[in-house]
Structures are given as structure tokens and as C-alpha cells.
Image (cartoon, coloured by chain):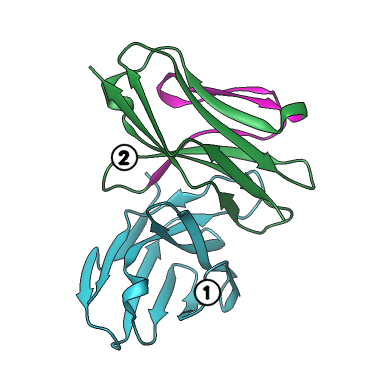
Chain colours: A green, B cyan
Amino acid sequence: AQSVTQLGSHVSVSEGALVLLRCNYSSSVPPYLFWYVQYPNQGLQLLLKYTSAATLVKGINGFEAEFKKSETSFHLTKPSAHMSDAAEYFCAVSNSGNTPLVFGKGTRLSVIA
Amino acid sequence: DAGITQSPRHKVTETGTPVTLRCHQTENHRYMYWYRQDPGHGLRLIHYSYGVKDTDKGEVSDGYSVSRSKTEDFLLTLESATSSQTSVYFCAISQGQRTDTQYFGPGTRLTVL
């Protein structure tokens, strides 16, 4: 069975500081990995996804993530946090075949002025 | 934005009453999903559909049933609502391949008193 672990349910950074949100996965097959963002009272929006084309994936709003097979990780980073980045972030892994995504429990990002 | 609507957006009901939530899409995507979101649990899959009249259970399917008689509509029914089913419910759609993005609806906030 596939699973996702997001380290830290809440991360707080200062405006302009590096954002690092951690995601580790467990998968018996080569994984496809996703990061979603959820702003308050909204649905989830795709930030970026890894589909084996390149290990460093760039997404929207200046976010990127690097797939590291040896560490089974897919951490999300942004060089400089903005107040508008405050949201909840979810990492997800694609299961084998056409079965649904498996989500981590989420990390809430706060940005302090 | 993907054409996904959910109705109702908010509902308050009493324990023991039946409740039906509707998800409607205009994208003609084959796959549709129902998730619930609870603090500390992230998103958990309730049921999903891989075609008209084709459905399967997810991680937290007890107490829920679904139906899909048309490509565009996916209904989630709580036969007899309980307080533990108080949650935010999200519908999602995808074309069904492992690399596909799941697009999420705006959510339905359900309170069972």
C-alpha cells in the first residue's frame, strides 16, 4: 500500500524567508507525486506534479519540488515566502493503475510579516 | 477552473436523517471522487467512480453510498446521518491516468447535530 507522510502539521516562516515543506512517500511501484494547495474555504489547487520526466519540478507561484528516490522524498520549497502563501499544503502519491490519489495529512503554512 | 460544482455548499441536519450531496461536472471526465476533510486527517477517500454505474469503495466508505447514472453527476448519500459525519466534503474529477491531475470542487460543509 502507498502512503504519504508530511512532517510538521504547522510551519511558520517570516515573509521573505525560505519555505520548506517536507513530504516522504512509501510506494511499491515508481510513484507519481503531487503537491496541492488549499486556501481558506476553498477546494484544492494543483501546485505541481512529478511524472518521472525530471526530478526537479517547477510549479505555480514560485514553488518547486525535487524528487529524491534514495530518500523517498518530495519536499516543496520556495526561496522567498509571501504573505499570500499562507495556506494548507497537501502532498499526494498516485497509486498503481487507475486507483485514486493517497494524500498526506497536510501542513499549514503561516507567514509572519 | 475545472467545471465542477457541488450542492448544497452548506447544510445543517439532524442525526438520523438522510442527506444527499451532489457533484456536477462539465468536463466529461471519466473519474469522479468523494473525499472528506477533517482536521488532522487530511483528505480521505470515501468512494469513487470510474464510469457510469461503476463505483468502488475508498478508505472511509462505511455509512455512505454513491450513485452515478450520468457522466456528469456523482451523488453521495448518507442514509442516516451521524455526528461523526460532520465534515467538509470535496468532489474531484480526473481523466483517470496515474499522471492526471485531480480537479477539486469548492466543497460542502455538512454539520450533523
Residue drawn at point x = 40 percent, y = 57 percent: B37
- Is residue B28 something one can see in this rendering? no
Say which mark, if any, is on residue B61.
1
Q: Position of residue B9 (x, y in %)?
A: 24, 63
Residue B56 appears left or right of A76: right
Please, what secondary structure does the residue beneath circle 2 have?
loop
Q: Quadrant of the C terminus of chain B?
A: bottom left
Chain identity of mark 1: B
Seen in the picture, residue B93 relative to A93 is either above or below; the reply is below
Residue drawn at point x = 46 percent, y = 49 percent: B103
The answer to whether mark 2 and mark 1 are in CB contact below 8 A is no
Residue A85 appears left or right of B11: right
Residue A52 shown in magenta: yes
Residue type (three-letter) at the residue carrying disc 2: Tyr
Chain identity of mark 2: A
Asked whether the residues under marks 2 and 1 belong to the same chain, the reply is no
Residue A39 appears left or right of B60: left
Q: Position of residue A50 (x, y in %)?
A: 63, 33
Q: Quadrant of the N terminus of chain B?
A: top left
Q: Which residue position is annotated with label 2?
A: A39
- Is residue A38 something one can see in this rendering? yes
Q: Position of residue B63 (x, y in %)?
A: 46, 81
B70 or A11, nearer to the observer = A11
Q: Position of residue B13 (x, y in %)?
A: 22, 78
Residue drawn at point x = 68 percent, y = 57 percent: A98
B6 or B1, nearer to the observer = B6
Residue A57 shown in magenta: yes
Circle 2 Cα neighbour tier, 10 Å, few/some/many (<14 / 14–19 / ≥20): some
Residue type (three-letter) at the residue carrying disc 1: Ser
Seen in the picture, residue A110 relative to B26 is either above or below; the reply is above
Range drawn in magenta: A44-69
